Image (cartoon, coloured by chain):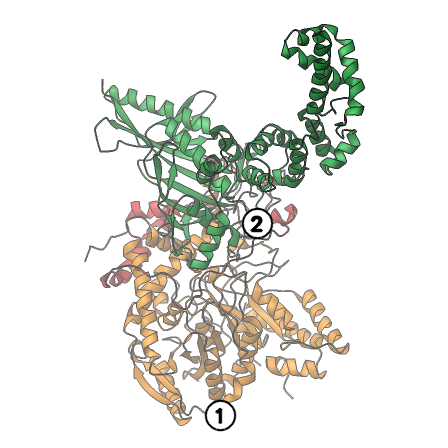
Chain colours: A red, B green, C orange
Amino acid sequence: MPDTPAIDRVELQNLASLARLDLPAERQAILLHRLQRIVAAFDALRELPTGPAPAGLPSLPPLGLRPDVAEPAMPVAEVLANTRHQAAGAFVVPRVVDG
Amino acid sequence: MTTYTTVIGLEVHVQLATASKLFSPAPAAALGEPNTRVHPIDLGLPGVLPRPNAAAIALAVRAALALGGDVQRLSRFARKNYFYPDLPKGYQISQYEEPVSRGGAVPLGDGRHCRLERIHIEEDAGKLTHSDLGTLVDLNRAGVPLVEIVTEPDLRTPADAHTMLESLREILRFAGVSDCDMELGSMRCDANISLMPVGSTKFGTKVELKNLNSLKMVQRALEYEERRQAAVLSAGGRILPETRGWNDEAGESRSQRSKESAPDYRYFPDPDLPPLVLDEAFVEAQRRALGELPAPRRERYRSVHGLPAYDADVLTRDRAIGDWFEAVVAEGIDAKTASNWVMSDVLPAQRERKTPLAEFPIAPPRLAELLRLLASKALTQVSARAVFRHMLAHAGSAADAMAALGLLRIADAPTLQPLVDAALQALPEAKAAVLAGKERALDSLKGHVMRACKGRADPAVVDALLRARLDALRGQKG
Amino acid sequence: MTSLWQMSAAAIASAVRAGELSAREMVTSCLDRMQRIDTGLNAILGTRAEAALQAAAAVDAARQGGHPLGPLAGVPVAWKDNLVLAGELATAGSRMLDRFRSPYSATVLERLQRAGAILIGRTNMDEFGMGSSTETSAYGPTRNPFGADLVPGGSSGGSAVAVAADLCPLAVGSDTGGSVRQPAAMCGVTGLKPTYGRVSRYGLIAYASSLDCIGGLARTAEDLALWLDASAGSDPADATSVPTQPAITPHLAARRDLRGLRVGVPWELNGPGLDAEVAAAIQNAVAQLRGLGAEIVECSLPSVAHAVPTYYLLATAEASSNLARYDGVRYGLRRDAISRCDAMMMQSRSAGFGDEVQLRILLGTFALSFGYHDQYYGQATRARALICADFARAFASCELLLSPTSPVPAFPIGSHIDDPLAMYLCDALTVPASLAGLPALSQPCGFTADGRPIGMQWMAPALREDLLLQVAHVFQANTDHHLRRPLP
């Protein structure tokens, strides 16, 4: 069995960045402690045999498909109704920086 | 100096020609004012669920069959998780470990092929535009159905990449999968390129090229990158794994992102969508809908219809042209005549009108009628073209057009005889030349007759009448 | 005469149909009681008095006009605030969606309206369904009518309290790992989690898509049968919905007793770790079931030992993806005056999500992340398959399985909130049926010495809600636990 991969501060920061969460330092300490406890308690799962992982419930029907018929779209005012940040019919966000 | 082998692989995104989006019933036309093609599903509102579009699945399967892919009887949608303001749900629904098709190949035209690794179905993201106000987000394109076609690293030159894309475009247009317009974004291409010393079998470090908005740009960007990498390697340098964006105006690419750390997309099967199970009947229906592909059709036009290679190429440029041509031939018209008219009259007129061939005002049986009149010599080539133009403008049959144009052919001798005599009277030099044995001078006499009756005279009758008069004149002299 | 607010949904609908009771009167009575009682409970996040009275007036007008009325005609229904209704707020208990107003309606709420139900108010819940006590709501905890310092359970705590305190006879909840059953048990009401896919999820603000089920809470099995018949059925808007099943209400009273019924008692769910009073109440219930003719059989679900980690890894992995849409761009809380888009997203999410939601997003991100994906998410998927197989084996030798719903009765507010792991372990008895997608029902089976309700959980094979409801109906006909009302 592999060693328990302890979530450390670096890993927590990586997870926060992947999940787009901005964690103040004092939150980080609490979250780190909680995550470590939870992951340690859940580690028994890794003792189960490995193999191909089935996905989904056996009782689910296969995927049903919708006929290709276009329906009227939402009025633009309704699309934008839940934000103040809009201009020229579009949502507005701050500058997007790649990388 | 070392010489290098270039290794190129392509990832091509093709928009499927559906009426509605992949997982929502909003119209799939990505045009129009911002956010006017949006359903709550495309907006990623709390509580919405995807509703998969049967036509998108059908077209993806058709693309796979057209490219010789192995259609998977069970495939699965997966979530590709990343944040970006053009991605409303914070994940893209795509396929990952279980794509809809594996394998396949695109012919390069000279017996060689570019093998495919896979084809998968996925949804498009929205569009960002940068303005003084900030970045504007338009979700019209969000959710539009795409297939991503991933090649093996089989291409060895930028020209091969160009050929591959042309061939792919032709096949997919033919299959009715997509209009594959790179300028309008319904076909998009990213290219991976690496160099290795000639004779080596170990691929070099690859660089991904993006922002390739036309076939020419693909080739130019690859040529530039080939030169750049060769220069770096020859100088003892190292190629960095990175994404580079092509700037066509500057004629160069610029580094956009280092690929040292791959993004962690945390793929997992989309729990909102059970597995996509395709039964034999569904796949067979798509195979039937696919019909004949361009290469076999070209071959048939050459061997069965006896057309020259040039004609066969033009007529297989898309499926509608060939179908139109065949509809004319089916009316009993000689294939070469039909081909000539389609290429030099129908297609130019259609291009001018900018309408699909299906809406062309002259239906194939109507053109066949015109061509039969031409073959029976009821019309000359010249007046046949006038009839064609009239039919184009007013619809109706060839006979209607001829009546309207007063073009019913004059073939009876008593009507034509005075015109023949008038020609001999009017052109004494020509008459003398013919009598002196210069056969070619006969043409100007015929031309005079034709002009006199606006081209409606039957040339064979005119010829006979002229020769009869001239023979008589020779007799008088002799 | 019983007060209006004490009537069951079935009684209300039949009185409204008979013209003995006006829907308007009924709705007014519920709204009044909410105003009077809920200040101390915080079960209701908002009412739609005007729209509800209009809808009630429409039902009354339809009756006077001689038009047929639906099976839930005039029945006031509260719904958990993670279900969207066009034109109404839907917060999912989160600051993130504080002012979010939905332009479309959940399938289940539309179906209930079509059946004549009057949607009167939105109920409090753990934020995005992430909690077992309704303490993680951004709008303050809901209090248990059986003790103001007690939690009502969660995450559908508001819906359970609405029924327990007689604010309305029927409430809609959602159950991802026990969120209908556990609060039903802690509040002394009956809660049904149907088979996965039996009720469309369209319009349910997702927590964990492969586990989320919309459920109902009521005082009687009969009312839940009415609720399920009105709510269930295949929906083209939900690709995971299962084909429509026959109605249950007509056959609800098919059994007079439990003769011929084999009830499996899996020792893993009835063993150590149970509160002593809970264990005693279950033993007592088992004796009553025997008395009603049921045959009790021992059985085993060996893999449920892994159920809690399996559940939490899968649920949080899916949640980390489902909650990625809350990025401040199109709706929801947004932090202003930030110059970069990614910083705007991060700060908006951190300000909009509460502590438990952030913890679960991080856990789920971990379970899916590079290097850990197969060991955590992958292993949980395999464990889930083993648990499904355990249930299939168990149902070869019995018709239903029985266990306590929660290992403990309602606990004091604030006692578990700083120990998420302890809170997770409280879900051990409800998550197995969730993982297997099976229908399960919790009904009152006793009380602690200090008067806290205790619930027992029935689990059935897929699509056998009919059996669950018939058996629960027989038990209720022979016991009175479900009749105890905490508030006058």
Residue B126 appears at what percent x and percent y? Answer: 52, 42
Badges 1 and 2: C-beta atoms under 8 Å apart? no
Residue at left offset 78%, top offset 10%? B425
Above/below status of B236 relative to C279:
above
- Would you name the residue on which mark 1 appears? C256
Judged from the image, the secondary structure of the residue bearing numbered disc 1 is loop
Q: Nearer the viewer, residue B445 or B401?
A: B445
Pointer 2 indicates a residue of which chain? B
Q: Quadrant of the N terminus of chain B?
A: top left
Answer with the quarter of the image where residue C52 lies. bottom right
Give how far apart the Cα atoms at labels 1 and 2 are. Answer: 53 Å
Residue ranking furthest to the left: A1
Badge 1, how many Cα within 10 Å: few under 14, some, many 20+?
Answer: some
Above/below status of C192 relative to C284:
above
Left or right of C333 in this view: C31: right
- Would you name the residue on which mark 2 appears? B20
Q: Label 2 sits on what residue type?
A: Ser
Residue B354 appears at what percent x and percent y? Answer: 63, 33
- Per the rendering, the mark at residue B431 is none
Q: Quadrant of the C terminus of chain B?
A: top right
Residue C350 shows in this picture: no
Residue C112 appears at what percent x and percent y? Answer: 60, 70
Residue at left offset 52%, top offset 44%? B176
Left or right of C410 in this view: B362: right
Residue B284 shows in this picture: yes
Q: Nearer the viewer, residue C32 or B271?
A: B271
Between disc 1 and disc 2, the foreground one is 2
Residue B171 appears at what percent x and percent y? Answer: 46, 39
Badge 2, how many Cα within 10 Å: few under 14, some, many 20+?
Answer: many
Pointer 1 indicates a residue of which chain? C
